[in-house]
Amino acid sequence: MSELFSRVGIVAKPHDEEMGDELRRLMNLIEGHGASVTLDKEAARLIEGTGVARGELATASDLLIVLGGDGTLLSIASDAARAEVPVFGVNYGGLGFMTATPRDELESATDAVLRGDYSVSVRQLLRATVDGPQRSEPLARDVLNDAVINKIDLARVVELKATVDGEMVSSFVADGLIVCTTTGSTAYSLAAGGPIVMPEVDAIVLTPISPHTLSNRPLVLPGGARVEIELVSRDLRVILTLDGQEGILLNPDDRVSVQRSPHSLLLVRPGERSYFDVLRTKLRWGSR
C-alpha cells in the first residue's frame, strides 16, 4: 500500500468545455475518499468556481491530478518538482507519454490512486542557464523534457558549438540542437531521430535537428554532464525554447549551459501500468 493523499489539487487543460461534468464527478470521488480538493484557475473556470495559481496549488497539495496532455503537465512540472508533490496525469490531449492514463479511465484510475494502488516514477529535471555580456544576471529555468536551441529564420541553418564538461564535441550546422532528459527522449528528440531512453537511466541526450552533416548523430551523455552551447552564426535570430512553454531570444554572445537540476518530478502511475505498457500503447508497437 502506497502513501494516501489528503489534499488533492487539480490542473485542467484550457478551453476544454466538455470537461466540466467529468470534473464535478472527479471532485465528488476525491471528497468521497475524505480528501480536500483545490482547483487551478483553468479548472475552476470550467465549473464557474474559484481557483488558485498553479504555483500556489503545488504547495497547497500532496497530490496533483492533471487533466490534459503532456503540455498541460509540463506547465506545472517545475512547480510540482520544487514542492516535491507527486503528479498523476490523465490524457485529455494527444499522444500523452506522461499523461498516460486514458480519459475514459479517469474515475477508476483516480480511485486506485486514492486507495494507494499506484507506483511512482522519479523523473530527473535539467536546469538550463543563459548568460552573456548583455545580460545583467544569468537566467535559469528547470525543464522536465528539453531545452531546444533553434533558428527562427526560414530556409537557413544555424551553426552551434557544443562542449561537454569543457571538452569540445562538435560544431553542428543544423536547424538546432535539443538537450533533453530521459523523459524528454520520447518528445521532440524522438521526432528528430533521437533514441528512446528508459527514465531510470541516468543520462542526458543531445540531438541535432536536421543536421547538414549526416554523420552528426544523437549522443547519450552521462547524467552528471554539463553541456554548453555557443552561437557560431552571428547573423541569425535564435531562440531557446524550454519545455515548449517559454521562449528566450538569444543574443549573439550568449552561452547556454544545461546540466542536472537539483529537482526531480514524482510521476504517479495507477495500478501496475509499466513504462513498456505506455510505449506499446502510444507507439502502437506490435500493430500492423
Image: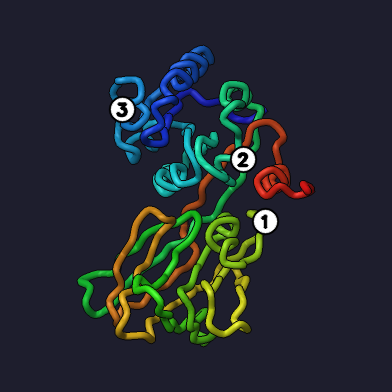
Asked whether disc 2 touches disc 3, contact meaning CB atoms under 8 Å apart, the reply is no
Tell me: 218 left or right of 13.
right
10 Å neighbourhood of mark 2: few (<14), some, or many (≥20)? some
Indicate the position of residue 246 as horizontal and vertical percent values.
34, 56
Circle 1 SS class? loop
In front: mark 1 or mark 2?
1
Residue 192 visible, this orientation: yes
| Lower sequence index among marks 3 and 1 | 3
**What residue sits right under mark 2 in the picture?**
120
**What residue sits right under mark 3 in the picture?**
51
The residue lying at 53 percent from left, 60 percent from top is 188
Which is nearer the eye, 147 or 153? 153
Q: CA distance from mark 2 to mark 3?
A: 27 Å
Circle 2 SS class? strand
The residue lying at 55 percent from left, 60 percent from top is 181
Three-letter amino acid code at disc 3? Gly
Residue 81 visible, this orientation: no
**What residue sits right under mark 1 in the picture?**
198
Which is nearer the eye, 113 or 97? 97
In front: mark 2 or mark 3?
3
Three-letter amino acid code at disc 2? Val
The residue lying at 34 percent from left, 32 percent from top is 42
Compared to 96, does 66 lie above or below? above
Compared to 158, does 12 lie above or below? above
| Lower sequence index among marks 1 and 2 | 2
Q: CA distance from mark 1 to mark 2?
A: 14 Å
Indicate the position of residue 161 as horizontal and vertical percent values.
45, 84
Indicate the position of residue 82 as horizontal and vertical percent values.
42, 47
